[in-house]
């Protein structure tokens, strides 16, 4: 085992994938956002109601 492997820290990713959910219908999809940014709140097209509505971040899926 090399000393360099022990001394190096694991680098955190800069982006994370999060699930956003429609406030109106509950339709969800995944979005990639910067790790240090605030929680997402976006206006996007909802396939169920066929209109644009507000989507809020529900949970973190994985690091990118």
Image: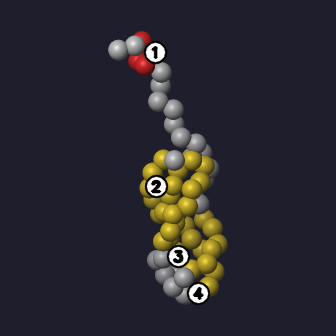
Instruction: Give me the C-alpha separation between circle 2 and circle 4.
Output: 26 Å
In what element is the residue under mark 1?
helix
Q: Mark 4 points at which residue?
A: 50
Q: Which of marks 1 and 3 is nearer the N terminus?
A: 1
Cα gap from disc 1 to disc 3, whole angstroms: 49 Å
Residue topped by disc 2? 60
Residue at 51% over, 63% down: 30
The nearer-to-camera label among 1 and 3 is 1
Mark 2 lies on a secondary structure that is strand
x then y, percent, for residue 52 = 63, 80
Alpha-carbon span between mark 1 and mark 4? 55 Å
Q: Earlier in the sequence, mark 3 or mark 4?
A: 3
Residue indicated by mark 1: 4
Q: Which of marks 1 and 4 is in front?
A: 1
Spatial separation of the CA atoms under disc 2 and disc 3:
17 Å
Q: Earlier in the sequence, mark 1 or mark 4?
A: 1
Give the number of the disc on residue 25. Answer: none
Q: Name the residue under label 3.
A: 23
Looking at the image, tell me whether mark 2 or mark 3 is earlier in sequence order: 3
As rendered, which of 50 and 59 lies closer to the eye? 50
Q: CA gap, disc 1 to disc 2?
A: 32 Å
How many neighbours does mark 1 have within 10 angstroms: few (below 14), some (14-19), or many (20 or more)?
few
């Amino acid at each position: 085992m090399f000393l360099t492997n022990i001394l190096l820290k694991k680098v955190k990713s800069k982006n994370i994938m999060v699930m956003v959910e429609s406030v109106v219908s509950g339709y969800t999809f995944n979005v990639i956002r910067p790790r240090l940014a605030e929680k997402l709140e976006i206006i996007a097209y909802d396939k169920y109601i066929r209109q644009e509505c507000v989507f809020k971040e529900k949970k973190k899926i994985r690091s990118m």
